[in-house]
Image (cartoon, rainbow, N blue to C red):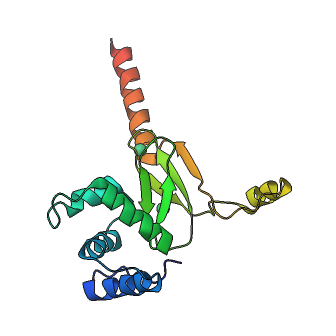
Amino acid sequence: MVRHMSTETNDGRTTRGLDELLHDRGLRNTPQRQLIYRIVASSPQHLSAVDVQRQLEKAMPGISLPTVYATLDLFADLGIVRKIALADGPVIYDTGQHNPHAHMVCRRCGRIFDLDIPPVSDADATAAAHQGFAVDSGDLVLHGLCADCRALASTSAAETKASALTR
Ligand SMILES: [Zn+2]
Ligand SMILES: [Zn+2]
């Protein structure tokens, strides 16, 4: 349910969407919420609260990290972003507009990649159902080495080998 979020950085359009969402919940739109919404709408797909705070610094100096977290959590409730908990890293907010998906995290460079499979497979849901558990949602986060880091690792391994041979 993130269809309402436009990729266009046309401020009027994106904030109007936020107005409606907040209004439906009886919440007020604030300059702070608008600014964070704009950052989320015009940013790369995966953001941490610290990334958002950094981008806010100019427009809203002194905004606290807990405030940014609270706003992003509210946006997650509203379906604007998706919250992904990584095993050992910050909570990441996914601004992706497509369906829920799984993620791959590189242990070397820390980059996060989308993997276009459902975060909870039918098999997972069925296994949970066997224990009487009804699955609402889930996150699949795979850890490993990305293509770039793998290429780098094999180059440096080859270099080490080559220099060992010339010695
Ligand atoms: Zn990597
Ligand atoms: Zn993603």
Which of the image's four quarters has the C terminus?
top left
Outermost residue on the right side: it is 130
Answer whether residue 68 is visible to the viewer in this image: yes
Quadrant the N terminus occupies: bottom right
* Residue found at the very far top of the displayed protein: 167
Q: Is residue 167 left or right of residue 26?
A: left
Which sits in the foreground, 30 or 133?
A: 30
Horizontally, residue 67 falls left or right of residue 26, namely left
Instruction: Give how far across and how far down residue 7 sits, in percent.
Output: 36, 79
Percent of width and height locating residue 141 = 56, 50
Q: How many marks?
A: 0
Tell me where residue 118 appears, x and y as whole percent: 63, 63
Residue situated in front as seen by the camera: 137 or 60 = 60
Residue occupying image coordinates x 26% and y 56% = 64
Which residue occupies the foreground of this view, 81 or 6?
81
Q: Residue at x 78, y 57 (%)?
A: 133
Residue 17 picture quarter: bottom left
Residue 2, relative to residue 140: is it above or below? below
Can I make out residue 10 in this image? no
